[in-house]
Image (cartoon, grey):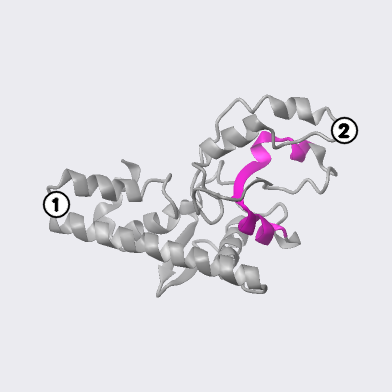
Amino acid sequence: MVKIERSYPAPASLAIEAEKTSGSYEKEDVVAQLKKDFHNKCYICEIDKLQDPQVEHLRPHKNGKYKDRKFDWNNLFWSCGHCNNVKNQKKYEDGILDCCKEDPEAVIMFQLKNEKVEVVVKDKNNPEAVLTANLIMEVFNLKNTGMRVYKSEMRVRELTEEMNKLYDSIEEVDANPDSKFALRKLKALIRKESRFAAFKRNYIREICQKYTSLLNS
């Protein structure tokens, strides 16, 4: 999970649909704007090029009980079906970080160690960060159904492949420090727009600190 810059104004359809008895928060303009703002990545697990995108509510609207939340542009997020399903637990209601307002990288460390995901909060007294870390751990590790075994393992596998690309890219830059092409590849891999960016950026920040300056370039 990385910081997302939400665009404004809100899609025009939201105000129109909010006045209807059975209005939709998934009109074409909403979907297009969310897809662009979130770089077509799930905001929770950061898998990209979503085949099953969903418009997810950060705080649940509970089938219209909280109608203001249902059509609130600031409450709509771009998610994959797997993460939305895992997040749909009472313990996560009103609790996780709003990555459009706060920077998750500032309060959480995202790590892959021996092909195992570890998400650690920097301050255990930050309840939103703790819940967010728990959620991300679950979307990569929860295996209480057959489909969740498959979806969790697939995400760990793809994260591992992406981290291997990062390791190879760092080796290439180390071996060819004057290569602008190699440096561009490394920069592209650690941009917030890239898949699993939080994990790759944390690796640079914690392990390969000589390239920390690239995180803001």
Viewer-proximal residue, 18 or 98?
18
Is residue 20 part of the magenta span, yes or no? no
What is the crowding at mark 2: few (fewer than 14 residues within 10 Å), some, or many (at least 20)?
few
Q: On screen, 173 above or below 4?
A: below
- In percent of width and height, residue 203 lies at 36, 60
Magenta segment: 68-88
Which of pointers 1 and 2 lies earlier in the amino acid sequence? 2
Left or right of 89 in this view: 165: left
What is the crowding at mark 1: few (fewer than 14 residues within 10 Å), some, or many (at least 20)?
few
Left or right of 46 in this view: 24: right
Q: On screen, 57 above or below 11?
A: below
- In percent of width and height, residue 10 lies at 64, 28
Left or right of 216 in this view: 81: right
Helix or strand or loop: what does disc 2 sit on? loop
Which mark identifies residue 21? 2
State whether residue 197 appears in this view. yes
Q: In the rendered image, which quarter is residue 199 located in?
A: bottom left
Task: Tell me the residue at 67%/54% (across/down).
Answer: 95
Left or right of 69 in this view: 97: left
- In percent of width and height, residue 154 lies at 51, 66
Majority secondary structure of magenta residues: helix
- In percent of width and height, residue 93 lies at 72, 55
